[in-house]
Image: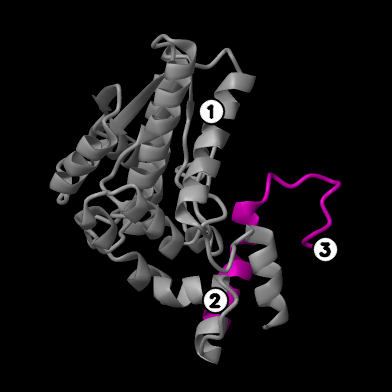
Amino acid sequence: MRTLQSQIIANLKVQPSINPLFEIERSVNLLKQYLLHNPQYQTYVIAISGGQDSTLAGKLAKIAIEELNASHDESLYQLIAVRQPYGEQLDEADAQEALTFINPDIILTTNIKAATDAMTSSLRESGLIVNDMSKGSIKPKVRMIAQYAIAREHNGVVIGTDHASEAFAGFFTKYGDGGTDINPLWRLNKRQGRQMLVALQAPKTLYEKIPTADLEDKHPLLADETALGVTYNEIDDYLEGKSVEESVANKIESLYLNSEHKRHEPINVYDTWFY
């Protein structure tokens, strides 16, 4: 195994294989223990897009909430699912199917189009260009503003959907979808998350669909693999310690090294990793 490959696997805590039922229980226990050890919170808030990751994290949270309420013989805890389309979402049917599968206690919708467009217009009036990529980075930040406003009013915390097959490349928006309170999928690759959804008997359409961040107006539903320049199967093989083509390994390692700042807390005088 390549030296950097071993380091990346160790840093992201990816296992070469998993027992899906054990990992489901592991994530559910994490979510339960967080609320039990922080009694000021009774609510989990999660944005549901209709993709694999939010579907899995949302379902794990719902199981945790149900088990907590059962153990307390009351409905103290709740899960709030938030729909956050930019205008009209092209795969809205998938989002609705995910919500049906998750069965959250509350469903809220905060359409981010007006706020995103207002910020974009304000920045352009200040002389900035704000191209499609820049606007695409504004959208997740607007979404997080809404999620934390909801969490604040419901004594809640925000669940993230970050996992190893995205974290290695910093394939998230810093202080956007990367700015959450708890990440129950962290340590898993895409393949392993899919195995867990199969074990949870999720609809196939939700874990067999092409993953997309859907942030760019000019490239709606742009596939993650196109944006990354490498397939999830290749990423997952690499993260499981398997051999991949030299060009693929180089691409993955380049993405990892170039995105180190996104996986690190803000730099202070005691940090030496970049010297």
Instruction: Tell me the number on the disc at residue 214.
Output: none
Q: Which three-letter amino acid code belongs to the residue tagged 3?
A: Tyr
User: x and y percent of residue 13 in the render?
Assistant: 64, 58
Alpha-carbon neighbours of circle 1 within 10 Å: few (<14), some, or many (≥20)? some
Residue 46 in magenta stretch: no
- Which residue is situated farthest in the bottom direction here? 246
Query: Depth-wise, is mark 3 or mark 1 nearer the camera?
Result: 1
Query: Depth-wise, is mark 3 or mark 2 nearer the camera?
Result: 2
Instruction: Give SS at disc 1.
Output: helix
Q: Quadrant of residue 61?
A: top left
Q: Which three-letter amino acid code belongs to the residue tagged 2?
A: Tyr
Q: Do the CB atoms of the residues marked 3 and 2 lie less than 8 Å apart?
A: no
Instruction: Tell me the number on the disc at residue 238.
Output: 2
Residue at x-position 29% and y-position 57%: 207
Alpha-carbon neighbours of circle 3 within 10 Å: few (<14), some, or many (≥20)? few
Q: Quadrant of the C terminus?
A: bottom right
Q: Which residues are magenta?
A: 250-275
> In this figure, which residue is indicated by the disc labeled 1?
32
> In this figure, which residue is indicated by the disc labeled 3?
275
User: x and y percent of residue 173 in the render?
Assistant: 47, 50
